[in-house]
Amino acid sequence: MPAPLNVRPFHREDRDQLTDLVNLHAAAVVPGATASVNTVLSSLERCPDEVVTDPWVAERLTLVADRGGQLVAAAHLHRYRDDDGVGEDYRGTGHIIWFLHSPGASHIPDAAEVASVLMSACLAQFGRWRVRARHADGRLPVPGVYGLPEQWPHVRAALQRAGFVHTGQTEVLLLAALADLPAPGPAPLPGLGSHRTVGPFGTRINARLDGAEIAYLELGTTLDRPERHARLGGLADLADFELPDDPHPELFGWLLGQARDWLELCGVDRLLAYATDDEADELTELTRHGFRELTRTARGWDHRPA
């Protein structure tokens, strides 16, 4: 007979088991993805990358499900302030930032029941907070892990049983080994050159034709800062790119070659990219130039109980 299940607030001595649970889920989405214990602990206190929404958070709570000293499930909740300083969509709402539980196995034969007990505790907390709406996500402190990825069917099932429905977009997460990107090469057009500047999301590689900018892409190269993650560097993301309406067929590949040259100097060997599932042209361009699909992740879950 299994030991009794105890749902309670997170204690600092849970930190190693919680990090293991986070990394178990992250590594199924992004190959080799891990977060350090310090990264996980810091993310429970604030989300520095969420520069707009994080200051709106009024309360944070992490709940864990403990069975005989074994942490088998956990969830992190936010309550957003209910005042004019908060964006309308967030004002007075409660969010499950992430909800994780060990899938069924011989040592956890009642995994779905465990998840339901923890979910009930999350909804009860929202009731005590008197939030006007309840939302859910799967945003872990790991690059590329957000929404509900396809690799987490047990988490999706737990949310659906509790009355959450997917109301947002589905995004495609892609990954390219740097060696699979186009190699740096000559410009495909006379007068075409590249110029590197600071962009709003990272390092911008601009394509300039006769001095006029015609396209760009931006590279985020601070995803794996060593003080935040258990593994050193190696991962960057294609945070943004823009091409002209009728681009030269080799322009995007040439830009990626310029990016590859810079990323090699940065010590990066893998590049993430993102697109929504209805952006067919973008997906075609990315897969044509060395990216492969890692997952499709469902963003935007609202609580709509029957």
Image: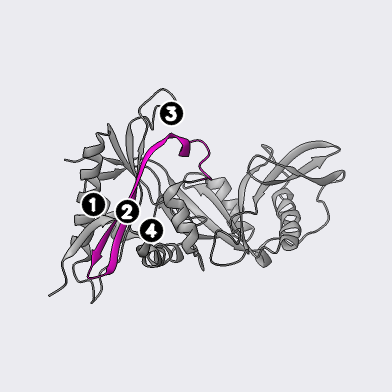
Residue found 56% across the figure and 60% down from its top: 175
N-terminal label among 4 and 1: 1
- Classify mark 2: helix, strand or loop: strand
In the picture, which quadrant includes the N terminus? bottom left
Tell me the CA gap for discs 4 and 1: 20 Å
- Give 218 or 136, whichever is nearer the viewer: 136
Tell me the CA gap for discs 4 and 3: 30 Å
Residue 285 visible in the picture: yes
Q: Which mark is residue 75?
A: 2
- Give 125 or 181, whichever is nearer the viewer: 125
How many numbered marks have been drawn onto this rendered protein structure? 4
Tell me the CA gap for discs 1 and 3: 26 Å
Labels 4, 3: front one: 3
Q: Residue 74 colored magenta?
A: yes
Residue 165 position, x and y percent, is: 28, 44
> Which amino acid type is marked by label 4?
Glu
Tell me the CA gap for discs 4 and 2: 19 Å
